[in-house]
Amino acid sequence: MLTSPHPVVPRVERRHRLIEELRATAPRKLTARSLAERTGVSTRTVERDLAALQAAGVPITGPAAR
């Protein structure tokens, strides 16, 4: 059995948490690293989730936002 330092969180809940973190700290900018620490996932997961949210039409802006 694989063990992870992070609990498994369903994707929709994780993405909702990202949106809430961004809203709570607006207009301050957050790094993917700080969002990862706040949500308990890897930086790469945050980057993928933010890209997916943008593709779904969520207005997220910033240097990493393409």
Image (tube, helix red, strand yellow):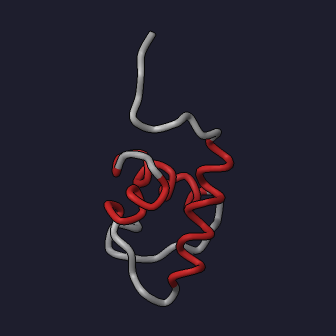
Q: In the rendered view, would you say 18 is above or below 24?
A: above
Q: x, y (%) of residue 28?
A: 42, 87
Q: Residue at x 49, y 90 (%)?
A: 27
Residue 8 screen position, x and y as percent: 56, 34
Using residue 39 as the reference point, say whether residue 56 is left or right of it.
right
* Residue at image point 55% right, 62% down: 18
Q: Position of residue 15 (x, y in %)?
A: 60, 54
- Is residue 18 rendered to the left or right of residue 12? left
Q: Residue at x 59, y 78 (%)?
A: 23
Residue lying at the far top in this picture: please name it: 1
Q: Nearer the viewer, residue 45 or 54?
A: 45
Number of numbered discs visible in the structure rendering? 0
Q: What is the x, y in percent for residue 9? A: 60, 40
Question: Which quarter of the picture shows residue 16?
Answer: bottom right
Q: Residue at x 51, y 82 (%)?
A: 25
Taking depth in this image into account, of 62 and 40 the one nearest to the observer is 40
